[in-house]
Image: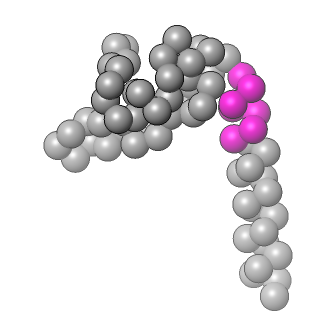
Amino acid sequence: MSKHIGLSREHEMLKREHGLIEKSPVVLATWNFDTSHKLAYISKNAHTVVGADAADLLDGRTNLLI
């Protein structure tokens, strides 16, 4: 039972952190560095911060130049 409580608290903390990221002027992005170098995740606030839709960036319709 205590492991479940700990995981539940960790989950709530991660949800709060992601909520803060979504509202901040910072975009969280992770890439797959296997052979594709494609985005694996980008925060939903990408449009506000970099002017590109997160879904378009993830599926490759729009490229993010860094």
Q: Where is residue 10 drawn, in percent x and y? A: 75, 61
Given residues 3 and 50, the one toward you in this image is 50
> Relative to 26, is 39 above or below?
below
Can residue 39 be seen in this snapshot? yes
Which residue is rendered at x = 78% and y = 68% of the image? 8
> Relative to 10, is 5 above or below?
below
Direction from residue 7 to residue 55 in the image, left or right: left
Direction from residue 44 to residue 38 in the image, left or right: left
Q: Quadrant of the C terminus?
A: top left
Q: Which residues are magenta?
A: 18-24
The mark total stands at: 0
Residue found farthest to the bottom? 1
Please identify the quarter of the rendering in which residue 6 is found: bottom right
Given residues 66 and 54, the one toward you in this image is 54
Which residue is rendered at x = 75% and y = 38% of the image? 19
Q: Where is residue 58 drawn, in percent x and y? A: 40, 34
Q: Where is residue 36 drawn, in percent x and y? A: 21, 39
Which residue is rendered at x = 62% and y = 25% of the image? 45
